[in-house]
Image (cartoon, grey):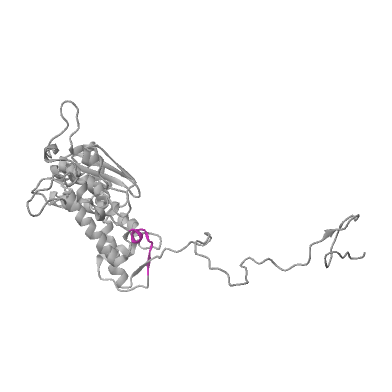
């Protein structure tokens, strides 16, 4: 997801609900210019957001906005306009999977941030045995939220908060690097939030988080990958800071700490900012590892001096006519006598 570079012109204005707050809406009229996005499509060629493929198999004009989306943010807005229930698989580092129901984002799964399952288990909110029982009762994975409620393991409101937080945190983690590619596939079952998050809201919140961490930490992507070291022991009064310090060993990154504790990546980064200000931890600066060839620029040698001057040595031996071996000479044309 590239929330910072979302171009509102990548969405199909003819499919945007004028009552929505998605980019591209004209604040003065509540609608959009039908020719703004493509420069050639007129108002009669646009289709309703709820229209789908017709009986002959002809694809709607709305599908064009999906295939021509220039980033994941524009893709999600186009899918929202179609009210699609689908799965967007994004490749990259870390990459991930975005689940949609009626165009709303209901779950985001990525190796860059803990999922709802990881949060429930790692935080100790439920046990491994309890989660295994839920999975057995619902092998498909679509109704696990209801099963958690039915077993009184997690309340409905608490689960909604967890799922919503995981959506925003997963989108933030995916935005730390540019996606390599993406693919829209059929929907797959997953533990999700109901009814879901508007793509426009998700993009705006991700952009806000990136901007805030950029001011506090510099490059958020580098901060998420930097190893964290503990400094001299100081009194710690926050239980959240105590938990993080218990995971800091000089090798773990903020992402590692988030997975260890079952907490979101973004909240962990914010806590580390505060802890760094209190002198409790420091982030490891990225330096050239020992033994790696240096990539530092080389300065030019001073005039008359070569940086690769060979050692001084005497004249090379040369073979004399009729001789049986090399003989050295002190000057050209002179041969040393035996």
Q: In which quarter of the image is the C terminus?
A: bottom right
Residue 147: horizontal and vertical position, in percent? 17, 42
* Residue 226 lies in the magenta-colored region: yes
Front-most of residues 90 and 311: 311
Q: Position of residue 150 (x, y in %)?
A: 14, 43
Q: Residue 70, relative to residue 217: is it above or below? A: above
Residue 251 percent across, percent down from the top left: 40, 60
Q: Is residue 44 visible to the viewer in this orientation of the structure?
A: yes
The residue that appears at 13% across and 42% down in the rendered structure is: 14
Is residue 232 covered in magenta?
Answer: no
Q: Relative to the observer, which residue lies in front, 323 or 81?
A: 323
Residues drawn in magenta = 221-230
Q: In this view, does 30 lie to the left or right of 246?
A: left
Q: Residue furthest right?
A: 338
In the image, is residue 140 above or below residue 104? above
Name the side, left or right, on which 314 lies relative to 156: right
Residue 60 falls in which quadrant of the image? top left
- Tell me: 268 left or right of 37: right
Q: Quadrant of residue 279?
A: bottom left
């Amino acid at each position: 997801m590239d929330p910072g570079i979302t171009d509102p012109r990548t969405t199909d204005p003819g499919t945007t609900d004028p009552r929505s707050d998605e980019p591209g809406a004209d604040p003065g009229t509540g609608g959009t210019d039908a020719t703004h996005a493509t420069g050639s499509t007129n108002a009669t060629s646009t289709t309703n957001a709820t229209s789908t493929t017709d009986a002959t198999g002809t694809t709607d004009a709305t599908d064009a906005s999906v295939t021509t989306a220039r980033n994941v943010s524009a893709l999600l807005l186009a899918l929202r306009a179609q009210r699609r229930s689908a799965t967007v698989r994004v490749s990259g580092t870390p990459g991930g999977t975005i689940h949609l129901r009626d165009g709303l984002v209901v779950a985001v799964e990525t190796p860059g941030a803990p999922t709802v399952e990881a949060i429930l288990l790692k935080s100790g909110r439920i046990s491994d045995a309890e989660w295994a029982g839920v999975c057995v009762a619902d092998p498909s994975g679509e109704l696990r939220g209801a099963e958690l409620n039915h077993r009184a393991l997690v309340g409905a409101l608490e689960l909604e908060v967890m799922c919503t937080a995981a959506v925003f945190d997963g989108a933030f983690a995916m935005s730390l690097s540019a996606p390599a590619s993406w693919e829209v596939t059929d929907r797959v079952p997953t533990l999700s939030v109901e009814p879901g998050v508007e793509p426009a809201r998700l993009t705006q919140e991700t952009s806000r988080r990136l901007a805030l961490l950029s001011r506090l930490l510099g490059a958020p992507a580098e901060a998420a990958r930097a190893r964290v070291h503990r400094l001299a022991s100081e009194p710690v009064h926050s239980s959240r800071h105590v938990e993080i310090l218990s995971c800091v060993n000089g090798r773990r990154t903020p992402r590692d700490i988030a997975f260890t504790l079952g907490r979101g990546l973004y909240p962990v980064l914010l806590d580390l900012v505060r802890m760094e200000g209190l002198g409790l931890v420091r982030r490891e600066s990225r330096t050239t590892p020992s033994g790696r060839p240096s990539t530092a620029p080389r300065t030019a040698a001073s005039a008359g001096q070569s940086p690769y001057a060979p050692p001084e040595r005497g004249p090379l031996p040369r073979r004399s006519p009729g001789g049986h071996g090399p003989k050295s000479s002190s000057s050209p044309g002179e041969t040393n006598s035996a």
